[in-house]
Amino acid sequence: MDYQKIINQIAQEVSVKESKGKVASYIPELSCVPSDKLGMHLYCINSGHYQFGDSAERFSIQSISKVFALTMAMLAPAEDLFKRVDVEPSGDPFNSLIQLEYEKGIPRNPFINAGALVVSDLLISHLENPKEEFLEFVRAIAHTKSIGINDAVYQSEKRHSDRNASLVHLMKSFGNIENDVDEVLDFYIYQCAVEMSCKELAMAFMIYANGGALLNTDSQIIAPSKIKRINAIMQTCGFYDEAGEFSFRVGLPGKSGVGGGIAAIHPGQYAVTVWSPPLNAKGNSELGMLCLENLTTLTGLSIF
Ligand code: DON
């Protein structure tokens, strides 16, 4: 498969399109990012790298971090993880409070904000230095020691986190949060503020395409049986109330973030990431989805 040729074709088609989407502004610092940024990177299981555009520039990974946090929670001896967080699509926006009330503080899945906040709580209970260990994990799987957070984004979200605070308080009232509300929020916001490029994200996501192992090493980060489950949750819940649409158009497990990034994998084939900040009404990158739809159309391959 000539991936570079296909990616060049996608670049040609998509870079002339004007997104009708809007750059996220409810975290004010995110709105400072130019809306015309566009990049894509595909990391193939045979070690090939293929890219176009702003694929080497770091951006705020936001909710894509939820995949890394879930992976760490599945590595921790936390038997109660899937008693405290379900694995069903929510059909609601990522920051919705509605289901939590009548489902007694158990979030639908680990990728909506409520679920990721429970995962953060669980990691705080199990790790000695959650922030440092989270960063170290991401650096290790991305093979890049310089990955860190964007402090301005971190501070900006800290000043605008009333909705997430409501989610943590509500879940704590149901007994599903063990730690201090502010500590849980702080750790969650820290993870979301991690900055990575499309290339770094594609390298990190290779463990999900490669059965949990770092490519070209003997290092098995997480068991294949757990990777199967994480990929299943990405497929069914990675795009909130647009998970069905993403499956329908793209046909790969993936995860989006309000920074405009999307990471997706084709098991046994590749990890691919895109970045375009304008979001559609469901909070997913509009042109990012289009790039990935073109990828599975032009290659003729998806997981279906
Ligand atoms: O908690 C928030 O609202 C953000 N830090 C992350 C949300 C997000 O990325 C949703 N993804 N599309």
Image (cartoon, helix red, strand yellow):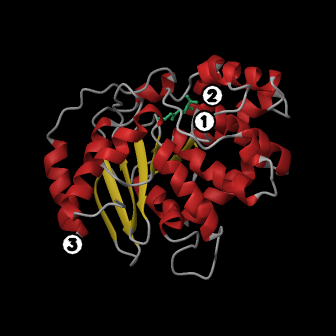
In this view, the residue in front, 39 or 176, is 176
Q: Quick check: is the Cβ at mark 1 less than 8 Å away from ligand 1?
A: no
Quarter that holds the N terminus: bottom left
Q: Label 1 belongs to which residue?
A: 151
- Image location of residue 302, percent across then percent down: 32, 60
| Residue at 60% across, 36% down | 151
In this view, the residue in front, 170 or 263, is 170
Image quadrant in which you'd find residue 179 = top right
Amino acid carrying label 1: it is Asp
Quarter that holds the C terminus: bottom left
Amino acid carrying label 2: it is Gln
Q: For numbered disc 3, what is the local secondary structure?
A: loop
Gap between marks 1 and 3 measured at Cα = 39 Å
**Image height of 49 relative to 277, above or below:** below
Gap between marks 1 and 2 measured at Cα = 6 Å
Q: Are marks 1 and 2 in contact (CB under 8 Å)?
A: yes
**Image height of 57 relative to 168, above or below:** below
- Binning the other alpha carbons within 10 Å of mark 3 as few (below 14), some (14 to 19) or many (20 upward) gives few
Amino acid carrying label 3: it is Asp
In this view, the residue in front, 254 or 81, is 81
Judge whether residue 164 can be spotted in this image: yes
- Image location of residue 45, percent across then percent down: 41, 74
Gap between marks 2 and 3 measured at Cα = 43 Å
Q: Label 3 belongs to which residue?
A: 2
Q: For numbered disc 1, what is the local secondary structure?
A: helix
Left or right of 285? Residue 146 is right
- Image location of residue 53, percent across then percent down: 27, 51
Q: Which labelled disc corresponds to residue 155?
A: 2
